[in-house]
Amino acid sequence: NGKGGSDRAAWLETYNGGARRIERVSAGSVFVKNWSACIIGGIQPEPMEAIAGSMHEDGLLQRFMVVYGKPGCMGNGNAPIKSLDDSYREMIRQIWMTTPGIRAVQLGTSAQRIRKDIAEHAYKLIGVGYISTAMSAHLGKWEGLTARLLLTYHACECAIRHIHPEAAEVSEDTAQRVRAFMLKMLLPHSSAFYANVLG
């Protein structure tokens, strides 16, 4: 839209969330309790490669969780499972209705250890030195990403149980799910993306 770097700075701010006051000459002052957004979309490798080549080195791209998809194929034609769809919608409704508490969500001892293990794994890969600068920058975001995913998984599981996220610590089982998601799914996809698309 022609605004260049100012838009990128705004998107980087939304990644961290938090309160923000927006001053508009025509609309006046607007206070946002949590200036945050989620972005999801799809793009072919070729245009992504062209876009990435002209992007600033500000870490915006490296904050995305990437899925490097395979070519499309014929669907199986199976009907959706209504019970699962209903459960998902109820979980989302519960999360939407949850109001922030006054205490931070706590990690259990085992979950804390697993979070540390994931971060150490990422930093070891960076330390090897054979991966690209862009991939290293992506892995450098993993320590914070792990905390975000732990909170997300915990919120989902608490919504299913109909309890507030503050009412329980993040469990070892939740942390193991996050570790599996990051190491078995995110890491291979990120490796393929940064090697095949960004070189």
Image (cartoon, rainbow, N blue to C red):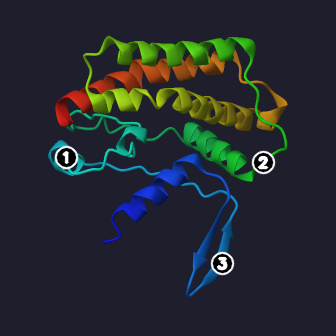
Q: Identify the image quadrant of the C terminus.
A: top left
- Where residue 65 sits in the image (x, y, percent)? 41, 37
The residue lying at 52 percent from left, 19 percent from top is 119
Q: Mark 2 and mark 1: span between their CA atoms?
A: 40 Å
- Where residue 96 sits in the image (x, y, percent)? 69, 51
Residue 10 lies, with reference to residue 168, above or below; the image says: below
Residue 94 bears which disc, if any?
none
Q: How many marks?
A: 3
The residue lying at 53 percent from left, 53 percent from top is 13
Residue 140, picture quadrant: top left
The residue lying at 28 percent from left, 38 percent from top is 75
- Where residue 192 sits in the image (x, y, percent)? 25, 27
Q: Is residue 108 left or right of residue 175?
A: right
Nearest to the observer: residue 186 or residue 31? 31
Q: Identify the image quadrant of the N terminus.
A: bottom left
Q: Amino acid at mark 1?
A: Gly
Q: Amino acid at mark 2?
A: Pro
Residue 45, picture quadrant: top left
Circle 3 residue: 29
Q: Secondary structure at mark 3?
A: strand
Disc on the earlier residue, 3 or 2: 3
Circle 1 residue: 53
Q: Is residue 71 left or right of residue 98?
A: left
Q: Secondary structure at mark 1?
A: helix
Q: Is residue 93 left or right of residue 116?
A: right
Nearest to the observer: residue 119 or residue 98? 119
Nearest to the observer: residue 40 or residue 130? 130
Disc on the earlier residue, 1 or 3: 3
Disc on the earlier residue, 2 or 1: 1
Residue 100 bears which disc, if any?
2
Q: Amino acid at mark 3?
A: Ser
Q: Is residue 86 left or right of residue 78?
A: right
